[in-house]
Image (tube, rainbow, N blue to C red):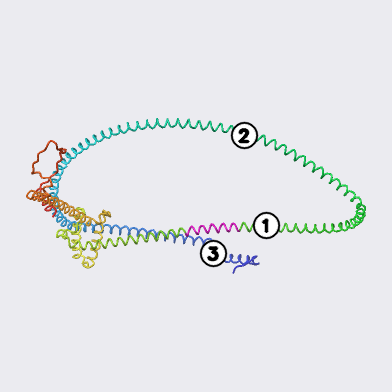
Amino acid sequence: MPTFGKPVKGSAALKESDKNKKGKGKDPLQMELEQLKEVEMRKKRENLLKTRLRELQEEEIRMSKWSAREIQMRWVELLRNEKLEELRSEIEILAQTHDKTLDRKNAVIKMLSTDLDEGEEQYRLVLRTHLQNVDALIELQNQRTAALEEEFERDLKESRAEFENEKSYIQAKHSQEKEELMLIMSAMKAEAEDMDMEMQAEFSQQKDETRDKNSEEYNVLKQTLESEIMELQHTISHEHDKYMTTAEEKMKQYQDLTKKDAETAERISSQMRKIQRLQESIANWKANLANTIKECEERNKAMKEEKETTAKYFKELKMKMQKWRKGQEDKLNELVRMARETKKSLEEKSKKAERMLRLGEQCKALETERERVLSFFNDQPVGDVQQAVAQRKERQILAAQMMQTEGVDEKHLVETFGKQYNSDLQMLRQDGQAEEWSLLENFWRKHNKVLLDNAAINQEKFHLQNENAKLRSLLKQYLDGITVNEDVMNMRNNLLMTTTFANTTVGEKTDLHKTVIEANVVVSNAQKQRAGLF
């Protein structure tokens, strides 16, 4: 039980008696040392046991990792060998297909090389024709430039003549207008001098009239003022007499008023003393009021400062809240916008994927036998394929040995080897981690083939249209040659011979050469292309 305040009397004696009783049995220091030694020995034994257990645990973990690594490496090697054998058989089929495709492409290349030679020959012919046309155009441009220069010189001469004529006319007109203006200025100057003389004469006349009028007004005003002065003097003398008669009465009134003034002065002095006492009390009240006002002002100032601080803090807090709300609103708007865009892009991708699936289903009906047989193309390296086949064979041999020697359950063995096979397959697929663009390799391969087919069909269509147009023109020429009608007679006919007369003009001769391709060449090229592509 705890004790408060001063220690209880006799407690020290009790403690000393307890120590003496314990000391009689055994030394307490020796007992504490023995206990400490036992604790240290126990800790050492525990530490040794912990270190030993930790070493055993680490050794066990290291051995288990090494064993798992060795087992995994052996299984990977077995699966790779097995996969290698499988891929070798597939590669043989692909090699045969590649050889056939290579032969077909070589035939197409030879056909295109012949077309290229013919095109180069046609290009050279067209180039010569183009150069001749360019030379003719340059000559025509030179002639046109010379004609324009002659026309420019002629226009320049005409413009100069017109300019000189207009210049002489303008100078003559300017001199005439200048003379007229000089005459007008001299007339205006003479008129101004006459007006100046008239105004000076009129001014002197008005000056004399004004002087006479002022002298008359001065005399009249002087007489009027003298009469008013006489009247004022008479009024002043009358008022002085009246004042002297009333002065005695006012003296009596003055004496009476002086007595009243003395009485009033005594009364005023008593009132002044009373006013002084009231002023002293008012001064005391003013001092108290000033102190009270000062205290109130200090209190109001402190409250005002506190109010301003609170208002400032409130304003800052409000601005922070508005800023935070605006930021959250912007984030929410951005999130909504991104969600809307994501939803829109996902819908577009979904529609595109559905369309691709529908098109794929529709295109399956249009695939050829060769495309159906070789619809899957594997671009994995040959070394990886051979290694995977060899590993597969080794895994099969090892599984058979385990079933014969250890008596492992067949179901458990199939599950174990299946998981390992799938993991190895995934490792083989992810060794090079194919790029994103390689995921649609089969699609783009088919797409490119379709584009090539369309290009070949368009080229064949173009050749056939040209051939059809040429055949139509030949047929029309033949029919025009064997028939006689108004259109044929109006058109040009190379079979008719005409003689030139002396008074007729002959058109310019042009060395234009039209490019001509024989019909049998076009037909043979089209047949070669169809044979090579299909």
When asked about the image quadrant of residue 20, the answer is: bottom right
Residue placed furthest toward the left: 482
The reply to whether residue 49 is visible in this rendering is no
Element carrying mark 1: helix
The answer to whether marks 1 and 2 mark residues whose Cβ atoms lie closer than 8 Å is: no
Closer to the observer: label 1 or label 2?
2
The disc, 3 or 2, on the residue closer to the chain's N-terminal end is 3
Q: Which residue is mark 3?
A: 26
The location of residue 128, given as percent across then percent down, is: 17, 39
The disc, 1 or 2, on the residue closer to the chain's N-terminal end is 2
The location of residue 359, given as percent across then percent down, is: 22, 61
The disc, 1 or 3, on the residue closer to the chain's N-terminal end is 3
The stretch in magenta equals 307-325
Q: Which residue is mark 2?
A: 198
Give the amino acid type for the residue marked by disc 2 in the picture: Glu
Q: Observer-nearest residue: 156 or 213?
A: 213
Closer to the observer: label 1 or label 3?
1
Name the disc covering residue 297, or none. Answer: 1
Q: Is residue 242 left or right of residue 101?
A: right
Label 1 – label 3 distance at C-alpha: 82 Å
Element carrying mark 3: loop
